[in-house]
Image: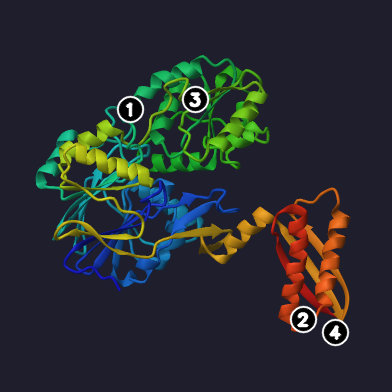
Amino acid sequence: MTTPGKELLFLALGGSGEIGMNANLYGCDGKWIMLDLGVTFGSQDYPGIDIVMPDLEFIEDRKEDLIGIVLTHGHEDHIGAIPYLAAELGVPLFANRFTAGLIAHKLAEEGLEKEIEIKIVDIDDSFQLGPFGIRLVPLAHSILEMSAVVIDTPYGRIFHTGDWKLDEEPILGVPATAAALAAIGDEGVDCLVCDSTNAFNVEASGSEGALRKGLEAAIGAAKGRVVVTTFASNAARLATLGAVAKATGRSLCVAGRSLDRILGVARSVGYLEDFPSTVDFDEAMRLPRDKLMVIATGGQGEPRAALARIANDTHQIKLEAGDTVVFSSKQIPGNEVAIGRIMNQLAARDVLTVTEKQAHIHVSGHPGKPELAALYGWLRPKLIVPVHGEVRHMHEQARFALESGVPGALVQENGDLVRLAPGPARIVERVRSGRLILDGDVILPADGETINERRKLALNGHISVATIFSGNRFVESAISYRGVPVEDDREAFIDEMRDAAELAATGPARDREKLREAIRLGVRRIATDWTGKKPVVDVMLVDI
């Protein structure tokens, strides 16, 4: 059992070595706190899976020592696992107003609002959580109320950035000033745990406020209907788009449940009060084509989102030749094919598309090297621990920090238990970490039997064999298959597999399990000879 002693420990269970699924632990004086509890999204590696979560076995085994979960902000990769995993941990959540509103909405959808306690912490407020002094510090990002966390312990002070950027014109919210961050540096920062997403970018991310001109030009030049897709969580972008709709004389329509949720939560905590009133789908379709602007979800190619359904003409919002779709977003790595599919569907209907490559209509929410260097200069940390990035991003930030004058850097990955203090920081142990998948309503190990079987089925197909006996006498075998690449000679293929099953069933093996295995191997051998594949073969022995 790893119980923190008179020391300061750090352990990432998600978000280090990957972008997404953030879950970080800090430990000292016998207690742990967690920062963030997020998800990542399914890929072709996980057939049929939409949501992937961190495996929390390490802290579940020590949950009597866990005293709280602090949330930096409301993006899914930082709060998305809360409805599935937080109740088991049995500790309160601490979040600012906007993030708490998003979490409360999620918990209500799952019927968990009475199961998990949410404590709202004001921006720039401080509170004590066991041996940890906690202060939320506002930083700019592509969502409202992103809060870095300053953690004071008897063994050192941590500045945990969360996701962040520098923004001279943030539109919504008031991030900490350079003077405020320098004042924290004056107090002393022993370790900076820092976002690495854009560590290779040599330019700063850019200001949200600078997008108004580019968006207004792109939408103002459009001749017909305009659909703008952006990240639903970016309330500042929604504010800009609302202003652009007014400036270009277009009525506004919103398509997507997540957009409705963000607008509702933002308004409930005092933001977006001047966002224009919207029209419903029916009214939108009655408006003159050059008088409508739609904000839609789905800029990452999500197949069930509004934009995908608009592109394949299964949505109430209809586009025609000469209409325009503006992608006010960046392609997240891995989504290129899905986004390209939607763009091709739009192009086939002569719908114009505008992306960040053609106009200044998007800025990142993560820091490039100029912003990282500025933060290093203000905070003057003794050590940097990169997080929130693939391995290459974290190593690049470590190199850049050392070049920028930070005295030390330590690169860790999920499962590396780091002793930050006292003494030189070092990895002291490798502990269990991993992934869980949400499969329907069931949470399973990502490397477990279910998903491994599904991968085999997806790769090789399936054959079902029912071999019938009367007493010990073979009668016949019934065979069917799915996903095995035989289409033109199905009957001949089945006949050969049936002959192989009969040969095995009338062979010397009389033990039922040996008989079943002999039939399975005989049938699979025929399938492999025909196709070069090794399908999953299930054999049922039937007595009549």
Residue corresponding to mark 2: 509
Q: Which amino acid is tagged 1?
A: Gly
The x and y percentages for residue 50 are: 55, 51
Element at label 4: loop
Q: Which amino acid is tagged 4?
A: Asn
Pointer 1 with pointer 4, Cβ within 8 A: no
- Mark toward the viewer: 1 or 2: 2
Q: Is residue 183 visible?
A: yes
Residue corresponding to mark 3: 355
- Mark toward the viewer: 1 or 4: 4
**Of the pair 40 and 459, the residue shown nearer to us:** 459
Q: Is residue 212 left or right of residue 279?
A: left
Pointer 3 with pointer 4, Cβ within 8 A: no
Q: Give the Cα separation between the discs numbered 2 and 4.
A: 11 Å
Work out whether 45 lies above or below 232. Answer: below
Q: Which mark is residue 206?
A: 1
Q: Give the Cα separation between the discs numbered 1 and 4.
A: 78 Å
- Mark toward the viewer: 2 or 3: 2
Q: Which mark is residue 238?
A: none
Of callouts 1 and 3, the N-terminal one: 1
Check the picture and name the quadrant holding the N terminus: bottom left
Q: Give the Cα separation between the discs numbered 2 and 3.
A: 66 Å
Pointer 1 with pointer 3, Cβ within 8 A: no
Q: Is residue 244 left or right of residue 373?
A: right
Q: Is residue 181 visible?
A: no
Residue corresponding to mark 4: 472
Q: Residues within 10 Å of mark 1 (few under 14, many from 20)?
A: many
Q: Which amino acid is tagged 3?
A: Thr
